[in-house]
Image (tube, rainbow, N blue to C red):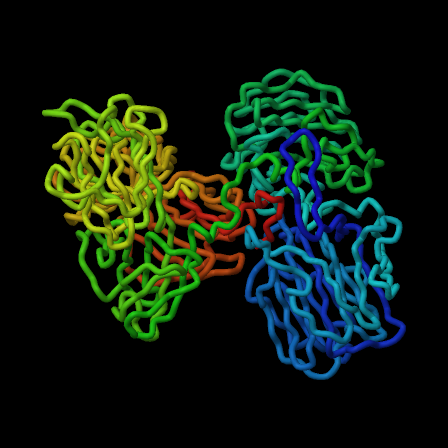
Amino acid sequence: MTFPILGGNSAVSVTGYQIDNSLRFNSGDSSSLSRTPSSAGNRAVWTWSAWVKLDGASTQNIGMFTAGGWSAGQDGTGLLYYNSQFLTYWNAPSPLSYSTGTFTDSTAWYHLVLQANTSTLKLWVNNQLQNSDSISGNGAINNTTEMAMGRYSGITNAFFYNGYMAEVHFVDGTAKAPTDFGEFDEDSGIWKPKEYDSSYGTNGFHLDFEDSSSLGNDVSGNNNDFTATNLASTDQTTDTPTNNWVVVNNLDKGQSNASYMMNLSEGNLKISGEAESSSARASGFIMSAGKWYWEVCLISAGIFQAVGIDASNSDLTTEGTGVDANSIGYYSHTGLTRRGGTATTSGSTWTTTGDIIGIAYDGDNGTLNFYKNNSLQSNNYTGLTEDFWMPSFASRNGSMVVNFGQDGSFAGNKTAQGNADGNGFGDFYYAPPSGYLALCTQNLATVNSYTIDDGSQFFNTAIWSGDGTDDRSITGVGFQPDTVWYKERNNGVSHRWVDAVRGIGKELYVDINNAEYSASNELQAYESDGFQIGSDGSINGSGDTYVGWCWKAGGTTPTQTYTVKVVSDSGNKYRFDDYGTSAVTLDLQEGGTYTFDQSDSSNSGHPLRFSTTSDGTHGSGSEYTTGVTTTGTPGSAGAKTVITVSASAPTLYYYCTQHSGMGGQANTNSTFGSSNFSGSIQSKVSANTTAGFSIVTYTGTGSDTNVGHGLGVAPKCYIIKSRTRADSWIVGHTALGTSTYPYNLILDQTGAKSGGSYDDYLTADPTSTVLNLGNAGNVNASGDTYVAYCFAEIEGYSKFGKYTGTGTRPSPYVYTGFKPAMVIYKMATTSGIWVILDAKRDPDNYVAQYLRPDSLSAEAGYNILKFTSNGFLIDIPSPDGNTNLSGEDVIYMAFASNPFVSSSGVPNTAR
């Protein structure tokens, strides 16, 4: 089915099975669902499927789907959530099996499938098998005893679930697979719900939570209804796996006193402060564009509450909203708004229970407006040029409930008024201002301009075990990589970095500063779904384990347009893109298509053609026509010569058919990359402007210069290495800052950033066309050759920034806007190791297996980060000198598996 999004914004059509409602459980209300079958079904074969959105903070056993008791002889069976893991059990109290992964993401949905199949009890999360245990006999589920969801069965006063549940199925007598209830989206690769279209068996049921007057209503046709306990119509929400709504992020909280913490409940919508100030962000997505509206209802007045907007990297360890320079807050007890701790104009105070504050942020025009009980206040902001805002809250004592549009009753504290936004989404107490939208993923898809829905099309990680054989294909990358950075994981062997521009067999160590070397038995070829490797122990030692990080640059069929002009330079000569040298030698890639635009009037009477002979027909050669087309008259609009370079094409020469001595050589390379003339010196570039990645090679001059990178936008990060000499890798990263000249780091060393007062390495930040280089041998020695890897930031796919360590918990939460596939980070202002982590080696929430680009050391592991659906949490509570040292800046590079929501409105699953 296709559901158009209507309204004034650009519409998208969300195609596929849609879920309209979910049920919100709250442990403080002791809410649950229960049913006792009148007759037993198949107790050894059944399947339970549900989508859940967790609060991300449970530290005790929480009953998700249970039956029977917990004591010996009570044959308890079911699924629990405890301390970030799922537990399955059969005939309790043992065996008890913990999921292989941890699950703390509170901003997106998980899909759970629990399957009993005579001899095994299995749990899948998002189609990934987590538990598989041997069982025998009958379990308690599907017996004539109580089955419960949201608590332990048989226990009515403890262990209640906080969070959401949607689209619950139970199939009696059949072991169903996750693919019966979900599927991978064709465009993004995101796991999403699909309609279940098979039978349920006698005791089977389907709870869709559509009937607010009967929340336990079974719509399977069996009428196996559940009893809803302490669940009201106000617990029905529109937050679903097909339209995910923003909530306050339980991982993104702070406080001014480590003994106190903001408490979240009611599906992470109720905010309760303690004796000291605390703060939190609703980091579902950054409001970088568009117009957004949300509301807050005061439940009980404390010393103060504050609402507003906050930067994704602002400091939550202080008083919170409005204190950091990139934070704006409207305070209840004074009516003042504050930014950077400085009070500005005053609005009305809001200290009466039931006061509703509306917040309207316009990311297109940079304005922030506050409303009290639908009355526009005077303490508003204009001229907000930053693009990193998200909803933010602070509280000291007292409580409030936020409504991003999913619950107009404010968890039952008000009577919902049913006011939707212009796209038809949301249930607000007051009508949103015209053009303002609710904070849900289907609205987000109308505002963001994502160009990459599936990050694995451009970056992917390969892992393999060595077998010592030659000519072995490593597949599963999903594309033909243009560069591979690989490392043996289990031994102290150096990192290697290879690319298709330098060519096969041209290897660079990463952790040491050696010059480029040749190797025939390491990475041997790039293939359509990966790469071929030899038997060398650095890449394929028998019994060893390996990882390779792969990026796609310009690929096998690049396109490039050169503007041609004819200049007087000891006779007429061709020049390209106004480069300062005439009749240059071109580098053209086999498989590439090159357009030579001759529309400039200087081309009149000078048709550009190709030959296998220098100077073409003037040198007794003939015109080369393979893959060549010509259009128009040189010197007139539309005139051009286009060549698609065939495989194994000979060395060519470009020439003028009418005059001799105007052209030069055109190398037709099996290596990748094409001539780039944007800089002061000519470079060879393989660029992927969609993914913001390019590989650049050039020859140094020994004096300050610049070189083209081919991305069309300024890179956020670039890594440069001399191929000729033993010099270190220079890392430029715009988050390092400048002090006259940009700072830089060294990839193969642990030292703090350097530069800033001299320009030997980098003379200025990169522009949309060039890298600015000094005269140091690391980047630009005369006659030496270099490679540069350049990365631009692409929304929803890559991010390059910094965070500041706290030295304690709460540790920083870094918002990226996507589910990370890889993160590299390094302390900037203090010496510390480089760390590289990825989701392939650690497919679960905790990411622990790290490698060091500055060292050949083997892989080591301890819980460093948690990857989530929209960023990553630094999970080291102590003042770790590499990751979370208090007050120290850490720069990072991150690449996505998927954006938080795809361009077609498919929400990412939780991680």
Give the residue displayed 75% in from the left and 20% down from the top.
375
Rendering quarter of residue 558: top left
* Residue 102 visible in the current orientation: yes
Give the residue displayed 33% in from the left and 39% down from the top.
560
Give the residue displayed 39% in from the left and 39% down from the top.
792
The quadrant of the rendering that contains the C terminus is bottom right
Give the residue displayed 21% in from the left and 25% down from the top.
566
- Please tell me whether residue 66 is drawn above or below residue 651 in the rendered image: below
Looking at the picture, how far across and down is residue 613, in whole percent?
14, 44
Asked whether 362 or 570 is in front, the reply is 570
* Residue 743 visible in the current orientation: no
Looking at the picture, how far across and down is residue 344, in whole percent?
59, 17
Looking at the picture, how far across and down is residue 741, in whole percent?
27, 29
Asked whether 313 or 616 is in front, the reply is 616
Indicate left or right for 834 with 373 as reference: left
Rendering quarter of residue 428: top right
**Total labels drawn:** 0
Looking at the picture, how far across and down is residue 440, in whole percent?
66, 40
Indicate left or right for 689 with 409 as reference: left
Task: Report the residue that reaches farthest toward the bottom.
Answer: 137
Indicate left or right for 347 with 364 as reference: right
- Please tell me whether residue 719 is drawn above or below residue 546 in the rendered image: above
Indicate left or right for 229 with 182 as reference: right
